[in-house]
Each structure stands twice: as structure tokens, then as C-alpha cells.
Image: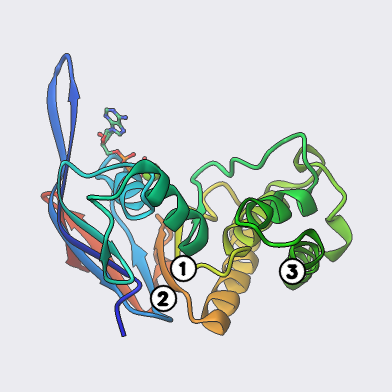
Amino acid sequence: MNDPLALRGVVRTYRGEAGDLPVLRGADLVLRAGEIVALVAPSGMGKSTLLHLAGLLEQPDGGQVLIDGRDCGGLSDTERTAIRRLRVGFVYQFHHLLPEFSALENVLLPQMIAGVARRNAESRARALLESFGLGARGGHLPGKLSGGEQQRVAIARALANAPWVLLADEPTGNLDVGTSDVVFTELLKTVRGQGVAALVATHNTELAARMDRVVTLRDGRVVPM
Ligand SMILES: Nc1ncnc2c1ncn2[C@@H]1O[C@H](COP(=O)(O)OP(=O)(O)OP(=O)(O)O)[C@@H](O)[C@H]1O
Ligand SMILES: [Mg+2]
């Protein structure tokens, strides 16, 4: 079986007028199916950059990103987008829900874009919202939900297409301790139940300790913590 996600020697340098900023300098990381890995590093070290590259939202300047053993570097934008939609779930650092669509529609849309029939998409969306304790909130617009509820909708949305890889960027970053614990417990349960490979960037060392392994970034490389 292939590993759901592998980064091999990934390099990323931001180029600007003030000079080049090398953020990743040969990052290696493998996620196995059903494994949850915490990425803990100080602000500005490159956590979001690494997740965006792993999620095919950005292209590395060097090295390889493999999803299920397939090197995504040489693919066209269309092919990369298709793999991202079907195989990767992304929870953004700032949740990015579509404000004019209800919670249910936010979870339904990625499935419909992936070609799932409306009826099936809707029953999965309802089941996911239910499992995140939001069964009664499906009709609400994001603006009418609390921060914790919005973040749970974002996690449900990321899991909507039953991805192989879940990438979560500070999924509980803006929540109080109690709420972040509840949200994280739900995330952990769902990810374990579905055998998804997950990489979770967090500043919260207590949450990190509940994951299978903790890695950090040092000199642009991924190292165990
Ligand atoms: N689009 C960009 N253009 C130029 N520099 C960028 C860009 N995105 C990020 N950077 C820089 O790259 C470095 C890594 O940023 P990144 O967002 O990956 O850090 P992070 O570890 O996620 O930080 P945080 O914990 O604050 O979210 C930072 O110094 C940042 O300023
Ligand atoms: Mg970040």
C-alpha cells in the first residue's frame, strides 16, 4: 500500500524585493493511513507553507509531493485540482466558510463539485454535521454560528469527500481551551474512525501530545520533537 502523503526534499523559497526567504529547505515527511501527526513550531517557521504544499494549494520550488505514491509535481493544474478535491481535506487557519451558504450547504458543496449526487451528498453532510454535534445547526449561515461551531463545520467540510489526507492548520487556534478540546476530540474520533492520514499544525502542546507523533520545523526541515 502506498503512503497517503509523502514529502521528499521539499524546497520553498518566497521571493520578494527585500530578498529571498527560504522557508523549507528539503523537508521530508511521510504520513501513513490512520496516523495523526502534530506539526508544532513557532510562528513564521513555515507550518502553513508546508500544509499548503502538501495540500497541492501551492507548488514547491524543489522536491516532491506524493499523494498515494503519485508525484503531483508534473501534473497540470486541472489534474492537481482533481486530486486535491477528491483526496485531500483542508481545514484553513481561518476557517474560510462560504458566508452566504448555510452550514449544510458548505459541507454539501465540495461533494457536488466532486460529482456526488445531491441526495447522497446531503445525507453525508447531515451525518457529518450530526457527528460534530451540529445536527440542529445545518440551516444556519456561518455568521450565525459561534467560532467553535464554525470550526466544526469547516472540519466536517474537509471530511466531506472522505479524503485520504486531512491537513488542518491550527483547527482550534481561535477557540477557548474548553471548546478547542471538544472540537479536537471530535476531529480525532472521526479521523481515527475513517483511517484518514492527518497532519495538524498547532501551537497547543497538550493537543499535540494526544496525537501519534509530534514533528517540528528546524532549519527548513521536518524533525521529530
Ligand atoms: N506569500 C508569501 N510571500 C512571502 N512570504 C511569505 C508568504 N507566505 C508566508 N511567507 C513567510 O514565510 C514564513 C513562513 O510562513 P508560514 O505562514 O508558513 O508560517 P507559520 O509557521 O504558519 O506561522 P503561524 O504560526 O504564524 O501561522 C513567514 O516568515 C512568512 O512571513
Ligand atoms: Mg500558519
Residue found at x 33% / y 79%: 32
The quarter in which the C terminus is drawn is: bottom left
> Can residue 108 be seen from the camera position used here?
yes
Q: Which residue is mark 3?
A: 124
Percent from the top left, x then y, of residue 190? 60, 76
Q: Amino acid at mark 1?
A: Leu
**Mark 2 nearby-residue class (10 Å; few <14, some 14–19, many ≥20):** some
Residue found at x 15% / y 16%: 18
Looking at marks 3 and 1 on the same chain, the residue that comes earlier in the sequence is marked by: 3
Which type of secondary structure does the marked residue at label 2 adopt? Answer: loop
Percent from the top left, x then y, of residue 114? 60, 56
Q: Which image quadrant shows ligand 1?
A: top left
Mark carried by residue 211: 2
Mark carried by residue 207: 1
Percent from the top left, x then y, of residue 64? 18, 56
Whole-Å distance between the Cαs marked 2 and 3? 26 Å
Looking at marks 2 and 3 on the same chain, the residue that comes earlier in the sequence is marked by: 3
**Mark 3 nearby-residue class (10 Å; few <14, some 14–19, many ≥20):** many
Figure quadrant of residue 224: bottom left
Percent from the top left, x then y, of residue 139? 87, 50
